[in-house]
Amino acid sequence: MKENVMDVLMYLFENYIYDDPEITPDRDDLETNLHQAGFSNNEIAKAFKWLDELAEQEIPLENHKQMLAPTRMYHDQEQQKLDVECRGFIMQLENQGVLTPASREVIIDRIMALEKEDTDLDDLKWVILMVLFNQPGQAANYAWIEDMVFYEEQELRH
């Protein structure tokens, strides 16, 4: 059995959310399909909780441009989950205007909600993709990250 919330989230995103975002599949059907794919009840419940909490964190458009803080100081638990490479990647995306301080905070919150001791760069990219997908007015930034996630993976497979 697959026992990782991130695997469940990636599976849901790739197979249901990404393909047709206009269609909202029935949660019971999704749960049945996730069971058939080999995910446990516990991990499925955690993934749905994670997605529900993400949906509650929608950032109003006017807050996308507001500055929270010019420099983000990470506390010890965040530093343990997000290594230097991940923190640098977040800062790079923020400096390039892909992330705002508000979206950065949602991303960090969603990373911290994952029950993993540490997060690698690939997991971080997926979380960023899911957060931007969920935020209004972020289509261009979402497309940029989408290219990075999907096309870099395909290049590596060849």
Image: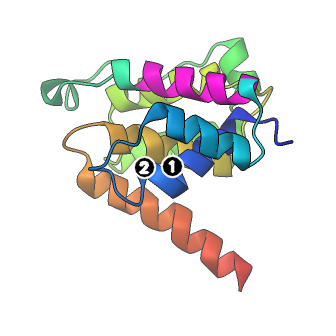
Q: Report the quarter where the C terminus lies.
A: bottom right
Q: Can you tell which quarter of the image residue 152 is in?
A: bottom right
Q: Residue 41: tell me if it is visible.
A: yes
Which residue is under mark 2? Answer: 17
* Residue at screen point 67% across, 48% down: 121
Q: Position of residue 133 (x, y in %)?
A: 36, 45
The reply to whether the C-beta atoms of the residues labelled 1 and 2 are less than 8 Å apart is yes
> Given the current orientation, which residue lies at the most extreme left position?
62
What secondary structure is marked by label 1? helix
106 on left or right of 41: left
Above or below residue 101? Residue 153 is below
Chief SS of the magenta region: helix
* Residue at screen point 26% across, 46% down: 138
How many marks on residues?
A: 2
Q: Residue 3, which numbered label?
A: none
* Residue at screen point 22% across, 31% down: 64
How packed is label 2: few (under 14 Cα within 10 Å), some, or many (20 or more)? some
Q: Can you tell which quarter of the image residue 41 is in?
A: top right
| Viewer-proximal residue among 28 and 11 | 28
> Given the current orientation, which residue lies at the most extreme right position?
1
Q: Report the quarter where the N terminus lies.
A: top right
Which residue is under mark 1? Answer: 13
Magenta span of residues: 42-54
Mark 1 to mark 2 CA distance (whole Å): 5 Å
* Residue at screen point 55% across, 18% down: 73
Q: Amino acid at mark 2?
A: Ile
Above or below residue 12? Residue 31 is above
| Viewer-proximal residue among 31 and 109 | 31
> Given the current orientation, which residue lies at the most extreme bottom position?
158
Q: Amino acid at mark 1?
A: Phe
